[in-house]
Structure formats: C-alpha cells, structure tokens
Amino acid sequence: MKRLFFFIGVTCLSFSPIIHERQKVFDVHIHGSKDIADQLTTLEQAGVYRAAISTSWNLQNTYRTQSNINLLFGLMFPCPNGKVPYSLQPCYGDGRDWPALNWVERQIKEGKIDFLGEILSQYYGISSSDTSLHPYYKLAEKYGIPVGIHTGGAGPNHGSPNFRMELGNPLLVDQLLSLFPKLKIWIMHSGDQYYNETISVMQKSKLVYTDISVISNSEIVPSERFSNIIKSFIEAGLEDRLMFGTDNGDIDKVITAVKGLGFLSKEQKDKIFYQNAERFFASTEISK
C-alpha cells in the first residue's frame, strides 16, 4: 500500500504544470500603433510594466488614459516635411517640423513630456549635434530629462528625402558631451552598424546609455551578429547602461533573443530587461 501511494504521488507530481515566471520588462523604445488596445495588451502580456513612447503628438495623447502600463512620453522632432517617418502622420497639429521652444518647456513643466526623442536629426538631414538642436538640449539638461537620438540605418519607405546614412554615426554625439556635461543621452539602436562608435562615446561619459532595439530584431539583424554586438558592450564594461527596446518589433522574439545570450548571467539580463532603464529614467526634480 505504501508503494502504491508513493507511485501515485510521483505520478501526480510529474503531471503538475510547470509555472514559468514572467520576465519583468521596461521597453524604452516603442511608437504609436493603429490598434492601441492590441499593442498595449501584447506588451502587458509579455511582462512590460513600463515603456517609453514617442509618436505624433495627437496620437501620443490618446495613450495617456488607455494603459495599465506606466508610460513615459517623448517628443519626436525635427520632423521631415512636418511628418513622422514611415507612418507619415503630421508630427504636430500645425504641421511644423519643429515644436516651439516655449511650448516644449511648458509641456515639460506640466509633466506631459518625460524625454526628448526620438530625435530625428538623421532623417531631417542634420547632425545630432547641429546648433539648431542646442536650445532643446539645453532645456533637457535644465529639467533633467533624457534625450534619445536615432542612430544607425533606416528601413525602406521612411518618407524622409534628406536622410543620410553618415548622420547616424554616434560619434556626432561626442560634441554634446562637452557642451552639455549634465545631459542624459540615450543612443538608440546601439548605433546599429556603428556600435563600436557607440561604445567609444559611452566610455567617455557615464550619462550616456543605449538601447538594443533593431539590433535585437532577428528579422533585421542576424542573431549571431546581435550576440557579438552585445558581447562587445559587455567586454567594454558597459553592462550597466544597456536598455531593452523593441521599436515596435515582436517583443516576444526580442525577449527570447536576450534570454538566449548564454554568456550573460540572469543578473546581467535583468539589468538589460529593466534595471538599467529604471536608473536612467529616475525622476529628477524640475527646477522652476
């Protein structure tokens, strides 16, 4: 009878469902969607509890009351012909390429803007350190909010006639480090093909972080190359400044790609998934 009881117990245990803990994720790089509810549900089911979004101002405002996810809101500019690349929606209701500086400051003070970005300088045909951007960087430094700058390449049909590949080089950010020493800079896409340049810039300032969007998307960048890029950042001692991002890519695939990096410990992966982003976006008291 005791043997029978033992057998039943083992059998029951063997058929018990295995519960996998859902990964906690802070996605620092998302954009608007035609189906907001579906987008937010997908993110939430994947474990996203916090995310940074930038898109057209009107579309972005519709997100403010619709999410269980703690959303941080960015300001996308300058806009080629007044439009968001790819979706080609007007960035602002008045059709401007650039938002008025006093309006931007008011939005920051009212808590409607948490970061400046995506900075579209490359799509606009200017350097990320162009003097026309300096007044905005000065505001960001004054109020302690981060600046996210597009780097690397671009997909097809972005609708930006002045786009230039060489303007996606993160070394252009170098000039900002001395001009704005307190500015929190976030190099988007890890620089993509310019990732070594991103590493160089990050080694010069502890206030410069990067996200892994695009390079973590296996439909764009082969998995082996993604692995090699992340290994380069780790070997450079930058594991505390790598942030998770999808750029509206398949989030489940991106999570799987990070989990598949066998040379990283769980602690290092958690830094990428959410811990580094929490530190980067830590609230700073606004100076009135």
Image (cartoon, rainbow, N blue to C red):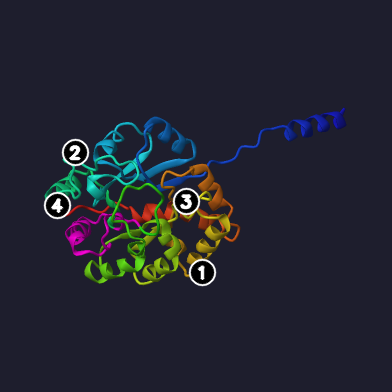
- Amino acid type of disc 3? Phe
Q: Earlier in the sequence, mark 4 or mark 2?
A: 2
Residue 167, position as x, y percentages in the image: 32, 63
Q: Does the magenta run of residues contain 137? A: yes
Q: Residue at x 31, y 67 (%)?
A: 172
Determine the CA span between mark 3 and mark 4: 34 Å
- Does 50 appear above or below 7? below
Residue 238, position as x, y percentages in the image: 45, 65
Q: Earlier in the sequence, mark 2 or mark 1?
A: 2
Is residue 283 or residue 213 the one in the foreground?
A: 213
Q: Does the magenta run of residues contain 106? A: no
- Amino acid type of disc 1? Glu
Q: Quadrant of residue 208?
A: bottom left
For label 2, the residue is 93
Foreground mark, 1 or 4?
4
Q: Earlier in the sequence, mark 3 or mark 4?
A: 4
- Amino acid type of disc 4? Leu
Q: Residue at x 20, y 49 (%)?
A: 97
Q: Which mark is residue 101?
A: 4
| Number of marks present in the image shown | 4
Write down the region rendered in magenta.
122-150
Give the SS element for disc 1: helix
For label 1, the residue is 235
Confirm or deny contact between disc 1 and disc 3 (CB under 8 A). no
Q: Counting other residues with Cα less than 10 Å from the Cα at mark 4, is it few (<14), some (14-19), or many (20 or more)?
A: few
